[in-house]
Amino acid sequence: MSTAFDSYELAGKRLANRIAMAPMTRSRADAAAGATATDLMATYYAQRASAGLIISEGIQPSVVGQGYPFTPGLHSAEQVESWRPVTDAVHREGGVIFAQLMHTGRIGHPSLLPDGLVPVAPSAVAAKGQVFTGQGMLDLTTPAELTEDEILRTVEDYANAARGAMAAGFDGVELHGANGYLIHQFLAPGSNLRTDGWGGSVEGRIRFAIEVATAVAEAIGGDRVGFRISPGNTYNDIVEGDDLDETYGALVARLAPLGLAYLHQLEAEGQRELVLRLRKEWPGTFVLNPFTGADVTGPEELELVEDGTADLIAYGAMFLANPDLPARLAAGGPYNTPDTASFFGGDHRGYTDYPALG
């Protein structure tokens, strides 16, 4: 029987344990220097390098992919160079780090974008809600519907950002197909009203996800690519239909031949049956961020590795409050208590230290 404290082989790397640090937006990039990574970010990730796998905060693959203030990119030479001290710091501490590529799609605001750009999405359907901007909280706006040529350019943006991640020293990338961001928007019929080859049927709605994963796998190798999903998660006003099982079953079936490093599922309430089904159907490494309701993921979730539900368990907020979390889990504590009320309760503290769902 494997335990969460056993080592694990992933993407040609030996992970020290099976405890992953989940992606969490931190909004600490240097906006004045072009959304570049900072020394604070290098310190932050190096402090948490005892995780078997670190998955970074969401990193935009293009200018228009930014939906929050002070988030970093991987679409310019300066951004790529700025990440090198971060990855070097993690590697010096013996850690492994993947860059999460997150295009926010319709989640954002024109005031966050330069040159008159506006958020984009599969369809011109605004999400309900607000986003923090330099002008405070503002309503999400109606996005521009992507043309087919723009979709294809967006796919290439992901591939180019993945190449940049490798040049910056990351060990791989995770494609963010969850939490109501662009890939998830294509998957969900509530945000994807298209009737062309990029929408309508299940096959049409999963096409963008498959095209992105294929392009990135071809760019850097499938064994360096993870893919995150969150079936049934309504975050960012995502509405998925009654064909949830069919949609994600088809998605996993199409992703499987690409030889990806892992599938990472963020579990929604009542989704354990689907978790077990996708775990069974996925041929490779399965990472689970388990549903824990109002509680943070805790030591009891380590049993999900022991019983075979997942190969790795992803912890989020507990890593913020406990940088040495694997050692504390192994020792049975003590644990610092994450301030989840301010994380998710609306106190954005100027957005400079706000771990939104990644």
Image (cartoon, rainbow, N blue to C red):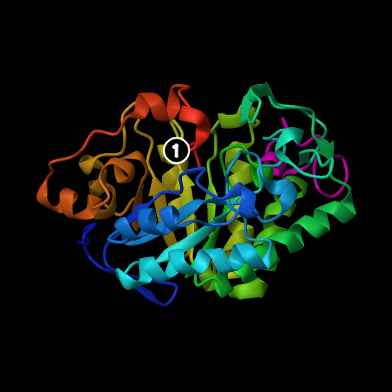
- Magenta-drawn stretch contains 194: yes
User: Image height check: is 233 above or below 173?
Assistant: above
What is the x, y in percent for residue 182? 68, 44
Quadrant of image for the N terminus: bottom left
Q: Which residue is mark 1?
A: 353
Q: Residues within 10 Å of mark 1 (few under 14, many from 20)?
A: some
What is the x, y in percent for residue 292? 34, 32
User: Image height check: is 129 above or below 324?
Assistant: above
Q: Position of 54 compared to 187: left or right?
A: left
Q: Position of 285 compared to 226: left or right?
A: left
Residue at x 36%, y 57% (from the top left corner): 43
Residue 214 seen: no
Q: Position of 148 compared to 104: left or right?
A: right
> Which residue range is magenta in the image?
185-202
Q: Nearer the viewer, residue 212 or 32?
A: 32
Kindly indicate the quadrant of the structure image that contains residue 135.
top right
- Magenta-drawn stretch contains 356: no
As drawn, the residue found furthest toward the bottom would be 12
Kindly indicate the quadrant of the structure image that contains residue 308.
bottom left
Residue at x 61%, y 74% (from the top left corner): 220
As drawn, the residue found furthest toward the front would be 32
What is the x, y in percent for residue 20? 35, 55
Q: In what element is the residue under mark 1?
A: loop
Residue at x 76%, y 39% (from the top left corner): 119
What is the x, y in percent for residue 76? 68, 63
Q: Main secondary structure of the magenta part?
A: loop
Check disc 1 and give the amino acid type: Asp
Residue at x 54%, y 33% (from the top left corner): 233
Q: Position of 48 compared to 125: left or right?
A: left
Q: Nearer the viewer, residue 358 or 196?
A: 358
Q: How many marks?
A: 1
Residue 125 seen: yes
